[in-house]
Amino acid sequence: MPNRPPSNHEPGDVVGDPSRMQALADCQILDTEPEAAFDGIVKLAAAVCAAPVALLVFVDHERQWFKAETGLGVREAPLDASAHRHALLEADLLMIDDTRNDPRISANPLLRLAGRSLRSYAGALLKSGPYPLGMLCVLDERPRALGAGPLEALALMRDQVAHLLELRRSHLAQHRIVRALDEARNELQRQVHRDPLTGLLNRRALESRLQLALESMPAEAPCGAVLMLDLNEFKQVNDTYGHLCGDRVLKRVAELLREATRARDVIGRWGGDEFLLLLPSTDLQQALDVAERISYALARDFSVGHAGGRISASIGIVPMTGFQSVAGLVHTVDTAMYEAKRSGGGGPRIKLTVRPA
């Protein structure tokens, strides 16, 4: 929604009334592109009233802006700063035979735009609720009175503009509702498929991605690999430093996994302190390189608690070739990961299973 412009509002100043300005802002009409519906009404007004100039004017706090116009070729005019600047926003229908003789409009810059000297004015006030927004008006270079028929037609066309504005407001409101629903749906999808702690994909989303990867396995090598990672002695972290510290460890591991992998790689939290990585179009050596980068990052960039305790991981690696189901693939890489964990030792614990068990 456009911000309400500042206003030096004084008592009796219709133009600067904050409620009127808010009603105008709510229309979201100022400085919008031309629209055929409004252009058509202005052209019809000029034809019915036999006037060379017709305008759909919205009065801002310091200018008169034309949503539609014919006969002038400009889109706005300054707002007369005189005491009579609000006069055109007071009468429902206003007919001025000779503008030079009427103080309500004689000083209005509108009459001298584009080198024109406009001598007669007829306008129908456009409102939103009780608040005047502007007018649908016709002007001529010669003094003349508009007959009752054309003046009534001008009022009817003004009513059509009001209906269009209401439809426009309804459309904008519906658009905001649809956008809010889309955002809510996207957030729900994010919650359904994301681990709330780490922001990584959750197990449900990982299973879907693995299924898709198996179904779209490329015929040529490399077909890809899956890594399962489990943090060593993570229970001791929680027992020694508390679960808040454990949560920070999991978040930091997620960050390191992102840093150690490519944009196309899929990373997720499988559950607890287990993480799964899907590396598409990756050969075994590349998968081993990723595992070693992860192990190195944990050893180099990671400490736990105030005592500076370290964290390490056991990693199982399985190439995706030959698997018919996600369950079989996950079972195999999980087995490889636990074999790595049982191997012990102070260095990286990485187990590569070349063929499905």
Image (cartoon, rainbow, N blue to C red):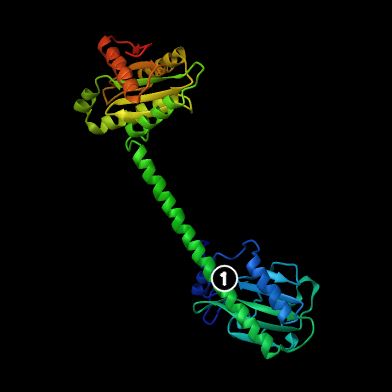
Q: Nearer the viewer, residue 216 or 79?
A: 216
Q: Secondary structure at mark 1?
A: helix
Q: Is residue 208 visible?
A: yes
Question: In the displayed structure, would residue 40 be above or below residue 125?
Answer: above
On the rendered structure, is 32 left or right of 74?
left
Q: Amino acid at mark 1?
A: Leu
Question: In the displayed structure, would residue 181 be above or below residue 260?
Answer: below
- What residue is shown at x 34% (from left), y 12% (from top)? 351
- What residue is shown at x 49% (from left), y 58% (from top)? 175
- Tell how many labels: 1
Q: Nearer the viewer, residue 218 or 146?
A: 218
Q: Residue 145, position in %: x, y?
A: 73, 89
- The local crowd at label 1, few if under 14, some if 14 to 19, many if 20 or more residues have their Cα within 10 Å, is some
Q: Residue 316, position in %: x, y?
A: 34, 16
Looking at this view, name the residue that lies furthest to the left.
239
Dividing the image into 4 quarters, which one contains the C terminus?
top left
Question: In the displayed structure, would residue 192 be above or below residue 216?
Answer: below
- What residue is shown at x 35% (from left), y 22% (from top)? 302
Q: Residue 347, position in %: x, y?
A: 33, 10
**Which residue position is annotated with label 1?**
164
User: Residue 197 occupies which quadrant of the picture?
Assistant: top left
On the rendered structure, is 41 left or right of 206?
right
Q: Is residue 103 visible?
A: no
- What residue is shown at x 44% (from left), y 50% (from top)? 182
Looking at this view, name the residue that lies furthest to the front.
324
Q: Residue 149, position in %: x, y?
A: 67, 88
